[in-house]
């Protein structure tokens, strides 16, 4: 009887894993349009919403600042609701914020901040879910690809949606609340507590951990992962916020600039999918972690120097190398943690502190441009940050594994002690 039930159980587990993967993909797709839709229509906000042009750098930095403040909300919600419904509630709040900032007069700034807080509450839990379900690099790759796909769809569809809705900018921004609601229902019903196996959460990489609980703030690898994540995010959000405006200064029209912003995100999709998979190979990881920062610095300077006619290929190259560190940052949270609980805490630390730093990117790039009346200072500053990403990546992959006490807990389990 038990042998007959075994294939049925295996099929049920496979279907459950597929449902979780599909839910994570849909969740990740919903976590960037709130930002890129606004970036793609930045030049229209003064006319459509009465936003002073001098406040646009603040608006660009607002969601990323919310990321840094709201990171602890995800683990707190997960404690009371479980990871699945914690992400679901965050997406419902995101849907409400997207609709309200587009439709309620004067709510564009608080709505953008609230959307950023909801995005972060959901985002910090994705590595924990991957770790709970013992997901491979493909799981993390699907999530990071979803981030890029969502960013591309947000940037590329907002203007066609506005045209389809009779010129309504508010409608084109508010409609993104619909997929957020669908994602909330899907992830809440699909994700349950992962099948954590005794003694296997950390895998072989947990060997050599000291049998003591050391706070993450005292573990140098945790700080290196947080620095890597934050600095690459600073680059991403600075470029996403200002690329379309920069391209218009090169002589491109608003429609062409928005299309290239979408191309920037689409070009990064393969990197987002493949980099977490390749990161599972230690030899590749040691080379890739510092190497990506150097490539980003070169790509940024190439985009700055290139004429309008060469922006399409160079923006594509920038999109590819710019998306790779985000995928690697998500992978590092999973790879360099000893188990699901550590992954959740390292995710909150990395994304919370990281995005607090990243909020300075759009603001600094915008203010440097306003001060100098040129884009060269902003791009050079970002290239220097890219070199810091390389240094943080080197430290993140060459330090000890991060542990929040799970190695100690496994030693206390009866199965770990012996039977």
Image (cartoon, rainbow, N blue to C red):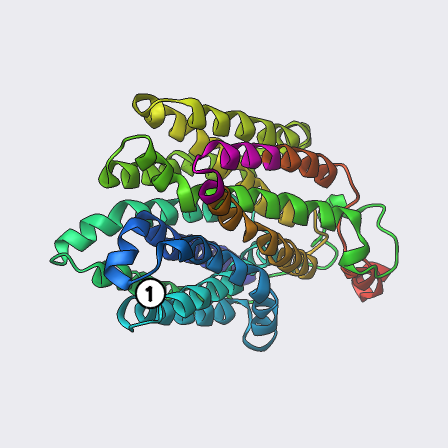
Number of on-image labels:
1
Furthest residue in direction bottom, as rendered: 80
- Judging depth in this view, the residue of 51 and 295 nearest the camera is 51
Q: Is residue 186 left or right of 117 when viewed as pictured? A: left
Q: Is residue 321 left or right of 353 when viewed as pictured? A: left
**Percent coordinates x, y for residue 243 in the rendering:** 39, 39
**Where, by quadrant of the figure, is residue 112 drawn?**
bottom left
Residue at point 48%, 71% (across, down): 85
**Percent coordinates x, y for residue 62 in the rendering:** 47, 59
Residue at point 45%, 44% (across, down): 370
State the extent of the magenta-drawn residues as a range.
369-385
Please determine whether, in this image, residue 295 is positioned above or below residue 95: above
Q: Is residue 359 left or right of 34 when viewed as pictured? A: right
Residue 18 makes an appearance in the image:
no
Residue at point 26%, 70% (across, down): 103
Residue 396 makes an appearance in the image:
yes
- Judging depth in this view, the residue of 247 and 315 nearest the camera is 247
Check disc 1 and report its element: helix, strand or loop: helix
**Where, by quadrant of the figure, is residue 386 drawn?**
top right
Q: Is residue 122 part of the magenta span, yes or no?
A: no
> For the stretch drawn in magenta, what is the main secondary structure?
helix
Residue at point 29%, 66% (across, down): 102
Q: Split into 4 quadrants, where in the image is the C terminus?
A: bottom right
**Where, by quadrant of the figure, is residue 73 drawn?**
bottom right
Please determine whether, in this image, residue 21 is positioned above or below residue 379: below
Q: Residues within 10 Å of mark 1 (few under 14, many from 20)?
A: some
Q: Is residue 383 part of the magenta span, yes or no?
A: yes
**Percent coordinates x, y for residue 384 in the rendering:** 61, 33
- Judging depth in this view, the residue of 126 and 23 nearest the camera is 126
Q: Is residue 330 left or right of 198 when viewed as pictured? A: left
**Percent coordinates x, y for residue 346 in the rendering:** 67, 56
Residue designated by label 1: 182
């Amino acid at each position: 009887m038990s042998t007959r039930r075994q294939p049925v159980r295996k099929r049920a587990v496979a279907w459950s894993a597929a449902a979780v993967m599909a839910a994570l993909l849909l969740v990740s797709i919903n976590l960037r349009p709130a930002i890129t839709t606004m970036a793609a229509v930045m030049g229209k906000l003064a006319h459509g919403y009465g936003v002073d042009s001098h406040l646009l750098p603040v608006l660009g930095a607002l969601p990323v600042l919310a990321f840094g403040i709201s990171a602890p909300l995800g683990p707190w919600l997960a404690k009371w609701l479980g990871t699945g419904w914690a992400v679901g509630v965050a997406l419902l709040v995101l849907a409400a914020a997207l609709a309200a900032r587009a439709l309620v007069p004067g709510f564009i700034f608080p709505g953008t901040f609230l959307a950023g807080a909801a995005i972060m509450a959901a985002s910090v839990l994705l590595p924990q879910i991957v770790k709970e379900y013992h997901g491979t690099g493909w799981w993390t790759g699907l999530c990071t690809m979803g981030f890029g796909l969502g960013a591309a769809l947000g940037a590329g569809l907002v203007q066609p949606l506005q045209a389809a809705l009779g010129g309504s900018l508010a409608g084109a921004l508010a409609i993104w609340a619909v997929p957020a609601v669908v994602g909330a229902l899907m992830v809440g019903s699909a994700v349950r507590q992962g099948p954590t196996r005794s003694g296997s959460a950390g895998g072989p990489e947990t060997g050599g951990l000291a049998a003591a609980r050391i706070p993450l703030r005292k573990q140098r690898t945790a700080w290196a992962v947080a620095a890597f994540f934050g600095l690459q995010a600073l680059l991403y959000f600075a470029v996403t916020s200002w690329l379309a405006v920069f391209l218009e200064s090169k002589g491109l029209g608003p429609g062409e600039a928005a299309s290239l912003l979408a191309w920037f995100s689409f070009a990064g999709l393969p990197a987002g999918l493949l980099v977490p998979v390749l990161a599972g190979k230690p030899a590749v990881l040691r080379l890739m972690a510092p190497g990506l920062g150097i490539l980003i610095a070169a790509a940024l300077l190439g985009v700055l120097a290139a004429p309008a006619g060469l922006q399409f290929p160079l923006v594509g190259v920038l999109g590819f190398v710019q998306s790779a560190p985000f995928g690697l940052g998500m992978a590092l949270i999973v790879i360099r943690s000893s188990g699901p609980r550590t992954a959740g805490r390292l995710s909150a630390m990395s994304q919370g502190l990281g995005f607090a730093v990243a909020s300075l990117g759009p603001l600094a790039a915008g203010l440097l441009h306003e001060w100098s009346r040129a884009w060269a200072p902003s791009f050079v500053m970002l290239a220097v940050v890219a070199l810091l990403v390389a240094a943080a990546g080197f430290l993140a992959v060459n330090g000890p594994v991060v542990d929040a006490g799970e190695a100690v807990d496994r030693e206390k389990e009866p199965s770990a002690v012996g039977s």
